[in-house]
């Protein structure tokens, strides 16, 4: 990580000044340079000078006239102290960077400095406080203007380890100010999913994302009323630890949180990458409205995907409102799941607006019925497809033409307790409550064969699934109901 030096301008001042700023969500920075918002934590004030500053002042006072004439202005000395956001004495205790010489809005020398290991450890713990100390060699009028601070994460050279799964632990937070903020904590479950771009997780209504480098997952995000950022570290023994810093949106309370030991409690309930040349025997195949059952469909395997490209419909409709043709893949899971993460990658094509087709993943409970459904749906001639999602009996209000004629998507359904959320390419599109042990998985390809005999006819483009992956925790109805009563 590299830090950029600031620009300075004149105003009212004293011999020695200090500003303290908080870096909010610093660990969410990407590999390219991004501007970080600054919030003033403490008011402008004076601090005791350091030996480096005193030496600087003595040296420059000796030849101030020549220096001033050469540079057209009075040189300044700038130091930075970096520490945890919770440290009110960061100007004294913080890690030192500098001193740097500033003359007439320019910094002598390189304006970029590499963060050392202790600073990187601070970054990984949560939000930072940075104290900027400005020293003038004479009692002059001055101020500092901080327009932007830039942080660069140097590219990760470590292979990302697998942090995905459902993790359970007990966390605690030291909340401030103690006068009206209560320390919080308790049991938590994290649903973590990972891909080549990083990882994301949810723990109920809160959600987070960020990069994974080696055994470290650096995340930021939050839930209703607060933001939080921190680091999830995978230990050699298979456990994990997590530290973070949170801030209420109204600024009333903040705290440093830790979970020293998280345990992975999930199991792989289903994984199919559709390698071919035939379907895994775990799938039961059924069809609706085809001429010869499964033989009435054309599907193939390529590039680790199952691709549906044609259907011989038993009935071609002359008006809307009748039966769709469907190819349905079904699996009964060996174990009913309480908390789970279900993810699948899809793609679709339609040559023109005549396509009428859908592709969806549906999760159900043999005992309690439908839990959640998500997928792509193109329901009528004259429009492109849109996103479809339902949790229990609560549908997402989708509109036609929301998606391109051809596209891809990574779709996810996750549940913690009874809180269920649906994401499309990492963005949440629907949430709600769904109760019951999840043990049935349906993957359905649909086509509506329509021809009104007057030139209006539907078509099937192609529908593909790259993978289906489900992780989960065994369902324990009694434990869940006991937990919900607490």
Image (cartoon, grey):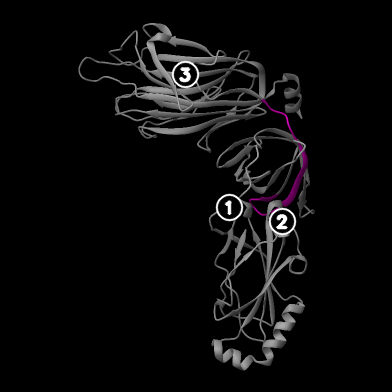
- Residue 365 coordinates in the image, percent (x, y): 61, 16
- Main SS of the magenta part reads strand
What numbered label is drawn on residue 122? 2
The image quadrant that residue 363 belongs to is: top right
What numbered label is drawn on residue 444? 3
Mark 2 to mark 3: distance in Å? 48 Å
Element type where label 1 sits in the image: loop
Is the residue under label 3 in contact with that under label 2 (CB below 8 Å)?
no
Q: Residue furthest top?
A: 292
Residue sitting nearer the eye, 252 or 312: 312
Q: Is residue 262 magenta?
A: yes
- For the record, the magenta segment spans 245-267
- Residue 179 coordinates in the image, percent (x, y): 79, 54
Q: Earlier in the sequence, mark 2 or mark 1?
A: 2
- Residue 60 coordinates in the image, percent (x, y): 67, 87
Residue position for label 1: 155
Q: Earlier in the sequence, mark 2 or mark 3?
A: 2
């Amino acid at each position: 990580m590299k830090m950029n030096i600031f620009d300075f301008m004149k105003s009212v001042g004293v011999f020695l000044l200090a500003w303290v700023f908080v870096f909010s969500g610093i660990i969410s920075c990407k590999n390219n340079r991004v501007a970080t918002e600054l919030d003033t934590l403490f008011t402008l004030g004076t601090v005791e000078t350091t030996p480096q500053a005193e030496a600087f002042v003595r040296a420059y006072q000796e030849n101030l006239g020549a220096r001033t004439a050469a540079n057209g202005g009075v040189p300044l000395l700038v130091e930075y102290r970096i520490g945890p956001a919770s440290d009110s004495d960061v100007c004294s205790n913080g890690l030192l960077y500098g001193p740097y010489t500033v003359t007439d809005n320019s910094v002598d020398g390189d304006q970029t400095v590499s963060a050392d290991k202790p600073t990187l450890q601070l970054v990984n713990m949560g939000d930072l406080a940075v104290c900027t100390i400005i020293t003038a060699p004479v009692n002059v009028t001055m101020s500092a203007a901080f327009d932007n601070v830039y942080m660069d994460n140097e590219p990760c050279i470590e292979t990302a380890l697998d942090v995905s799964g459902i993790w359970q632990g007990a966390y605690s937070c030291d909340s401030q100010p103690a006068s009206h903020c209560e320390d919080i904590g308790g049991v938590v479950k994290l649903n973590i999913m990972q891909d080549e771009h990083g990882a994301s997780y949810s723990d109920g209504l809160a959600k987070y994302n960020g990069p994974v480098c080696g055994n470290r997952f650096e995340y930021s995000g939050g839930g209703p009323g607060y933001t939080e950022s921190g680091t999830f570290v995978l230990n050699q023994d298979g456990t994990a630890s997590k530290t973070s810093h949170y801030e209420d949106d109204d600024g009333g309370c903040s705290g440093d949180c830790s979970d020293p030991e998280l345990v992975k409690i999930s199991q792989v309930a289903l994984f199919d990458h559709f390698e071919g040349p035939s379907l895994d025997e775990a799938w039961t195949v059924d069809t609706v409205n085809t001429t010869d059952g499964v033989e009435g469909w054309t599907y193939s395997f390529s590039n680790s995907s199952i691709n549906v490209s044609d259907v011989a419909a038993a009935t071609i409709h002359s008006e809307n409102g009748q039966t769709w043709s469907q190819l349905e893949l079904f699996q009964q899971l060996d174990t009913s799941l309480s908390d789970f993460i279900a993810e699948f990658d899809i793609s679709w094509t339609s040559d023109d607006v005549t396509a009428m087709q859908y592709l969806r993943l549906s999760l159900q409970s043999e005992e309690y019925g439908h839990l959640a459904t998500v997928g792509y749906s193109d329901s009528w001639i004259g429009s492109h497809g849109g996103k479809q999602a339902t949790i229990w009996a609560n549908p997402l209000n989708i509109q036609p033409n929301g998606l391109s004629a051809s596209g891809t998507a990574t779709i996810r359904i996750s549940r913690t307790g009874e809180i269920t959320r649906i994401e499309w390419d990492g963005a949440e599109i629907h949430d709600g409550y769904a109760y019951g042990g999840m043990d049935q998985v349906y993957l359905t390809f649909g086509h509506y064969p329509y021809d009104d005999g007057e030139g209006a006819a539907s078509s099937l483009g192609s529908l593909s699934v790259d993978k289906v992956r489900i992780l989960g925790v065994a369902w324990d109805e009694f434990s869940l109901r006991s937990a919900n009563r607490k």
